Amino acid sequence: MTSSQDVIGPQPRPTDDELAAMPTVRVPWQRPRARRPAGGGAPLVVAALVNTLWATLLCVAVMIALVLLGRISLGQRPNGAEITVALAGWLLAHGVPIKAGIGQIGLAPLTVGLLAAWRLNRAGVHTARGIGARDSGSVSKAVVAATAVGMVYGIFGFVTALVISKPGMELSPLRAAAHLLVIGALAALIGSLRTTDGVRTIARVTPVPIRDGVRTGVVGALMVLGAGAGLTGLAVALNGVEAVQLFRAFPSGAAGQVGVTLVCLAYAPNRATWAAAYLLGPGFVIGSGTIVRAGGVVVGEMPPLPVLAGVPNGSLEGPGWLLMALPVLLGLASGLLLVRRRLRPRRTRSGDMVVPEARWGRLLAAAALSGPVAGAVVGLATLASSGRLDGGQAFPVGAVAWQTASAGTVAIGLGAMLGVIASVGRRRRTS
């Protein structure tokens, strides 16, 4: 007779042959996992065309709704021209300048641009799935899917600019095709790489310091841009009386206030990026007469928009200069996150917790690399958020991309290295 100790006690681990011979037990409420085919799927052209068309229609529909709401808020009746204006605004959101009766408009509303980038990202995801490349680990298939989306998107931009261009609204079809092709391909590539698991494939062949440097730089750049958004909201709140006066003074009463609110929301990410350039040091301009820097402000003629009520009237004084240390502190935080992620205890297959060995040389190299990466991200954001509004005279708006990128490289790279060095000292004291 078998004792209870023999039944309950530890049993020998079955071999691989015994495990393979065991019957498979299916749980009634658990759906069996289907194997994904290695290839197949829809033709590439069909998948890219359908997904890119859907992304385009969604963005254009949002633009049409905004234009209709704006016209209604101004007491105007829809007359059919809203579609043309919406299509022009959609192209403008991708950085395509428009020559209208009031002059050249070259300031992209980043809210609409970010919406388009998100939908293009999803187009890349669905195109990669449609051609049967999901979880294949193939980088080439991800690139092919993203390139197809970008080419289709560029064709849409070329045709749209060609159709709506007229004497009162001139656009360059070739420039529209180039802008939309590049933006569409890059945004779709992010989604297609995640879908095909190409990100992991690239990570396997990339040295660890480079992977950590890219991740830390992107995190630091996003922190600085987020700080710019917070500073914008704080500045408008502190100057709430002036903002309300500008809001109430806008023509057409409450209806006009709805229109100006839409304009402020469309350009909210632009304003956050300018505030980030202010924190980094280079500052920004609004027209040829208004220069905003921490060391001094020259206030000239500005559009009467409530969101511009938060523009500083003078240079920083006293404790206000502590704001200039914020990018370095955010870089330091990204460096601390790098160390925490790399030296976090990990559980082995046997169940034991093991603390990875601290390789400070690699961590310092990654922190140093994070500076140029962060500078590139901040510089691209600055380039996308800046432009010109030329109504008969030069009216630049925004910050200089290369200056902001250089300042971001120094601030975030220095902060990340200080974070790693501080972690070294803390761990040596505790050891």
Image (cartoon, rainbow, N blue to C red):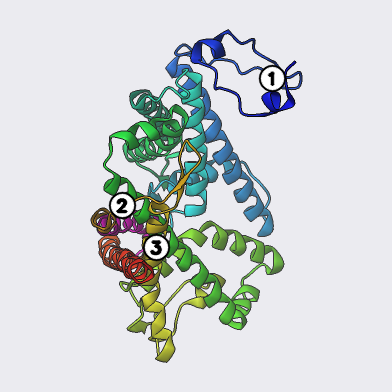
Q: Is residue 19 left or right of residue 395?
A: right
Q: Alpha carbon of mark 1 to alpha carbon of mark 3: how far? A: 43 Å
Amino acid identity at mark 3: Leu
Say few, some or many: other residues with alpha carbon within 10 Å of mark 3 (under 14 / 14 to 19 / 20 or more). Answer: many
Report which residue position mark 2 lands on: 213
Q: Nearer the viewer, mark 1 or mark 2?
A: 1
Amino acid identity at mark 2: Gly
- Taking depth in this image into account, of 130 and 30 the one nearest to the observer is 30
Are the residues at dot 1 and dot 2 in contact (C-beta closer than 8 Å)?
no
- Magenta stretch: give its range: 367-393
Report which residue position mark 1 lands on: 31
In the picture, the quarter occupied by the C terminus is bottom left
Are the residues at dot 1 and dot 3 in contact (C-beta closer than 8 Å)?
no
x then y, percent, for residue 84: 53, 41
Q: Is residue 61 above or below residue 8?
A: below
Q: Alpha carbon of mark 3 to alpha carbon of mark 2: how far? A: 13 Å
Q: Residue at x 64, y 48 (%)?
A: 68
Report which residue position mark 3 lands on: 336
Q: Is residue 200 left or right of residue 303?
A: left
Per the image, label 1 sits on a secondary structure element best described as: loop
Q: Residue at x 45, y 61 (%)?
A: 270
Asked if the magenta segment contains residue 388, the reply would be: yes
